[in-house]
Image (spheres, coloured by chain):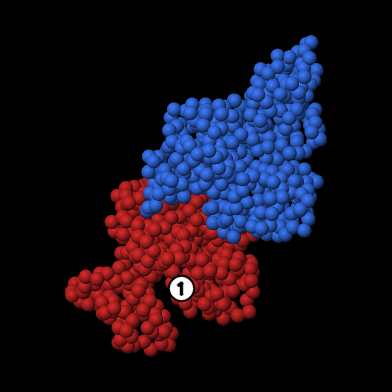
Chain colours: A blue, B red
Amino acid sequence: MSRLARGFAARGYTRGDALALASGNSAEFLAVYYACARLGLVCVPVNLGWRADEVAYVLGHSRARGIVVEAQLLEALAPAWERVPTLTDVLVAPGTGGPAGTGTPLAEIETDGGPVEVVVEDRDPLSYLYTSGKTSFPKGVATSHLTITMESFSAALDSGWGPDDRFLAMMPMFHTAQLNAFCTPAILVGAAIHVVRGFEPGAFLDTVQRERITQVFGLPMMYRAALEHDSFAGRDLSALRRAVYAMAPMPEPLIRACLDGFGCDFALLFGQTEMSPCTTLFRPEHQLSHIGAVGTPITGVQVAIMDAGGALLGPGEQGEIVYRGPSTMNGYLDDPDATAEAFRHGWFHSGDVGWFGADGVLWFADRSKDVIKTGGENVASLEVERAVYAADPGVAEVVVVGLPHERWSEAITAVVVPAAGADLDPDALLTALKERLDGYKVPKSVIVVDALPRTSTGKVRKNVVRESHADHYGGR
Amino acid sequence: MSRLARGFAARGYTRGDALALASGNSAEFLAVYYACARLGLVCVPVNLGWRADEVAYVLGHSRARGIVVEAQLLEALAPAWERVPTLTDVLVAPGTGGPAGTGTPLAEIETDGGPVEVVVEDRDPLSYLYTSGKTSFPKGVATSHLTITMESFSAALDSGWGPDDRFLAMMPMFHTAQLNAFCTPAILVGAAIHVVRGFEPGAFLDTVQRERITQVFGLPMMYRAALEHDSFAGRDLSALRRAVYAMAPMPEPLIRACLDGFGCDFALLFGQTEMSPCTTLFRPEHQLSHIGAVGTPITGVQVAIMDAGGALLGPGEQGEIVYRGPSTMNGYLDDPDATAEAFRHGWFHSGDVGWFGADGVLWFADRSKDVIKTGGENVASLEVERAVYAADPGVAEVVVVGLPHERWSEAITAVVVPAAGADLDPDALLTALKERLDGYKVPKSVIVVDALPRTSTGKVRKNVVRESHADHYGGR
């Protein structure tokens, strides 16, 4: 990591420069991230699900001077950075292999020498984490050294992690949860991290058993797939102390099966990129007594419920979930309006609606913003709605909602009203959308209806749409 | 605590105002400190060992608008604040009782109401902690909210503290170690604090047993006194998980007796006020393998050894111990020269001399200002002190100082307290030391005394020893 930082310095990178990183899970990913931290560079992880125009947007918007890219991604991503004149340095990590050619091998720039002496200040940005908001292009969440340090201390302290822990890193490191709620705290406490490039149930079980993994992080559907795998029975998973899941509470049958099957604690991590990301932990002691809740605040994060006028609400009262504390982002890069909007009334506005029980446990009700959380990604419903209108002139009206889905948490679903006399074909519409949207943004299904429910002022009542079709995928 | 913060606000205190606090250990001490934090006030703890002119200096220098004082201290301290025209508000905590009269009872200002809404920034000062330096009046160490938060996270994480812990607070809260290395982390993790006003061995043992105390902090001599107390045998101290001691390593016989007697972990806390205060922990696993060391860095603090020119030194090389990291003070209040001097070469200079072993364990050699310059040689007094202990078991305590001497400039001198019943022969001791030390390190004389002068935290006051014996060699 220090050898890499020296290498970046030798290539002219200095404190405040942005360096993009397009990589699957690997030791190099972490080495590049922490080398950026050491040198005061700003790391810009590239989401490997983005289209080329989104990648180009992020590289240009962040003013990345260079990019570290895994060999197998060169061909797909080169068209993106070729559109960005400010990006002049391409460094190639080995990854899973690819065509030789473009760029400088990362290993070649590593440099021996003395300590890397760069002093960074508390609120210097450490990364720009681009996250989808209401608009079609993602916003750059500027996280600072302090932000990530505070989040890491909180996560480690509240989870009881220590140097004897052995983490399995299988969720994408380009997402903040894997990177900042697991890898960085693990390094803070001196624990081991076993890096894998993805999830496959048999391999997952083999690794947990062989490596005596103590801490894992995955999606509910991954734990289910592992439980249902042929090789599950008779496994020695006794080293496992805690399995963390993200995004949404588990339904009761699954949480019971997980507790029985894995014989370890389960905890839900809840939060968002702007909060670095963890804000509440749904702790092991509440998993069965408060099924469906999202937990209690982690140390160092203040969580409250606010009404539309900025007043804080009491227990049992529903409103927007708002946050405050040192692990809050600096702001959205070059977007003072969005930043001011997000921090109105002195709190960060999550866009989530919820309430506190009298016992201090937080319950999540809904997204207030039209953002769908699907398979670990945020998707703006507006973007999908625009694509639907553009794809088929036979659509009179559409709302795009996330409906409960066992695998995706929320499955993107288009609810459409056909134009009078139009012969709307849902399959053709889906095919057309695949050409216009990233794969993960394409609706899982199209539901045709005669009319949409509306408020007295004519606004579509999305919550009613969601409730009407809640069982479309068989529920959670 | 919120009721008190509302009361301060109602009296006109606002963010940035300094409020002094003169109190023995009490629940009110903590309530006032955290109410200051809540409201953005700067708490200025008064050391109860200070002379009136030192108290007046601190109240004036910190521009304290008010003081919270325990009733029994009113009479002694009133002359100090009466000299400070800027201090206009006297609030009286019950303490152990005292004459009615001056000031407003603290309980009377407490105010019910809604949340206290003051947003503080990371580096807003939380306290000015006055600490004696080389000069006659103490310097005001400006600690920030961030400083104390980072220190608290580090202490809690590295010590494995959690909500089930029960702390005994018996060391003075006006010192940073009790306040910031124990009370604040305890509150951070939601642990219990049992507050007592001081140390008495029988009462200490009763409290640990009765309250099922899990974490204690004291001086080596306190643990010794408890071990030697009549009532020690047969005690149930089984709840005790860790005993922390401060200031200096324990000699081998004492640490062995402590480990055997208390049956819990022992750990040395090392640091200083400017570092909020903990920098290294001499951890349980090293207590017997590295006797005399001061430990390994706590999470979040960088520790290095620096030479006089600002170069960092490697393992085994002796130099000044320097620190860096987010728990470092903002600076000395209104003393930019001292602040710049302390932070030269980009690190905080501890004034301590030491070295790292190849295994990363830090060893303390001496205070840099206590290095004795004798006949052109520098001699670490600690090295000579260790030799004295080793040479003669009849020595209970020793300090080695340099006293003015016409020929040697400073003559190395051992000031010893004999063990009870020991017949200590100074000439025999000097003869024995000649076999253990380089000639120039052998004391020029041994002075036998009944007791050594100490600070309220138990540190030997070497400057007082030097002054008392300044004429021992006839002066310069």
Residue in the foreground of this view, choosing between B135 and A234 = A234
The quadrant in which residue A367 appears is top right
Q: State whether residue B160 is above or below residue B204.
A: above
How crowded is the residue under tag 1: few (<14 C-alpha within 10 Å), some, or many (20+)? some
Give how far across and how far down residue A461 sits, in percent: 73, 23
Is residue B412 shown to the viewer in this render?
Answer: yes
> Residue B317 falls in which quadrant of the image?
bottom left
| Amino acid type shown at disc 1 | Ile
Q: Nearer the viewer, residue B379 or A378?
A: A378
Residue under the image location 47 percent in, 36 percent down: A102
Point 72% across, 24% down: residue: A430
Residue nearest the observer in this picture, A221 or B68: A221
Residue A120 left/right relative to A258: left
- Residue B175 image point, x, y percent: 45, 59
Find disc 1 in the rendering and name its residue: B291
The image position of residue A368, as x and y in percent, is: 67, 30
Give the chain of mark 1.
B
